[in-house]
Image (cartoon, helix red, strand yellow):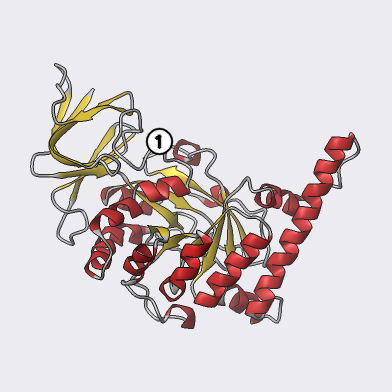
Amino acid sequence: MIAIKGGKLLTVTNGTIENGTILIENGKIAAIGADVAIPEGAEVICAEGKWVTPGFIDAHTHISTFAEPQPRPVVHDGNEVSSPNTSQIRGIDGMNPKDMAIKAARDAGFTVCYTGPGSANVIGGTGFAFKCIDGETVLDLLIPGTEMMKMAFGENPKNVYGSNNILPNTRMGVASVLREALFNAKAYSDAKLKAEQEGKEPPKPDFRLESLVPVVRGEMKVRMHAHRNDDIVTAVRIAKEFGLDFAIEHCTEGYMIKDFLAKEGVTAVVGPLDMQPAKMEIWNTTFANPGILEKAGVNFCLTQDTSSFTKMLPINVGIAIREGLSWDYALKAVTLNPAKLLGLEDRMGSLEVGKDADIAIFNGDPFCNYTKCTETIIDGVVFQH
């Protein structure tokens, strides 16, 4: 048994416990409170003067699929740029569990990250969530049942394919490629269901359409990359048109359409907040975006998006707090909210009895740039930094 003793426990769901204790047994939180007795023989971690939080979760990264260290010339495994629709692609097939970004994220207090294909294609394939542990194979890290489909709007897909005079060449083309794929997938799915009900021969197998069947049936969440306000609205319209379970990724100009997002009940994964104006659709990036969305009642997580730069997310969250985001929502945006997005809130995202012992210990406010994560605990295994 492990005991974390004397820390400031930020439970997320049940307030803050000063000078509290957490007991960990068999990889789970066994007890938490201000008056928890520590069993004899327990391994004690002294957290006096420290802040103890649920392990941080980044719900949108490209860890390992955009490999680090990067090869030269740079050829990322994260984008299969051979077709604007690669729904059959699986991020798990491109992940190296020895990638240096995994440890970098863990050292910053992250216990779980989500990774997957990039945004070069209108439909990029599936990603998945994983524990930031030292595993022998990707199967040791993978959290089963967290697979989600990546889709993208805006400049990335239209520039990748339009430059070669291949559809899509415009934003209208991006929307048409997606609608056609979803239309065909729904027809394929309906034909399969009808054949099953009538005991008839199913339609000819189609590997690409098969990958979209759970999407059009609402059984697999869709992660829709969209920066510009009009792209975000187009993504929401198409998602509603086909009855998709979706989240908006980046939502860079979300603050411009905050009331629309709130009315439509949109969940967003916001960030990175420190993007430079490398392309037109991210010129309006601002650290004020999360605070504006919070005040409008929009539900969101925060992300750093890339690989080793995941470690910079807590610092950027701190700047967002300076620009209007509340501290309490900031903590939720990197713990419980991403856990809910990934369908893992029953296991992580807060300090509660029975949940995975995924915990981060900091020597100060975790969103301060001179605070250090001193220990990260994943499934009860302690990683010292």
- Figure quadrant of residue 48: top left
Q: Which residue lies at the image location 89% right of the left edge and 36% below the top edge?
A: 198
> Which amino acid is tagged 1?
Arg
Quick check: 303 above or below 107?
Answer: below
- Figure quadrant of residue 322: bottom left
Quick check: 163 above or below 376?
Answer: below
Asked if residue 351 lies left or right of residue 47, the reply is right
Decide: few, some or many residues near mark 1? Use Cα within 10 Å; few <14, some 14-19, many ≥20.
some
Q: Position of residue 60 (x, y in %)?
A: 44, 57
Q: Position of residue 266 (x, y in %)?
A: 50, 60
| 193, 243: nearer the viewer | 243
| Residue 97 appears in the figure | no
| 72, 213: nearer the viewer | 213
Element at label 1: loop
Q: Quadrant of the C terminus?
A: top left
Q: Which residue lies at the image location 30% right of the left edge and 41% below the top edge?
A: 13
Quick check: 369 above or below 331?
Answer: below
Determine which residue is flagged by label 1.
347
| Residue 47 appears in the figure | yes
Please give the count of numbered marks on the rendered protein: 1
Quick check: 175 above or below 198?
Answer: below
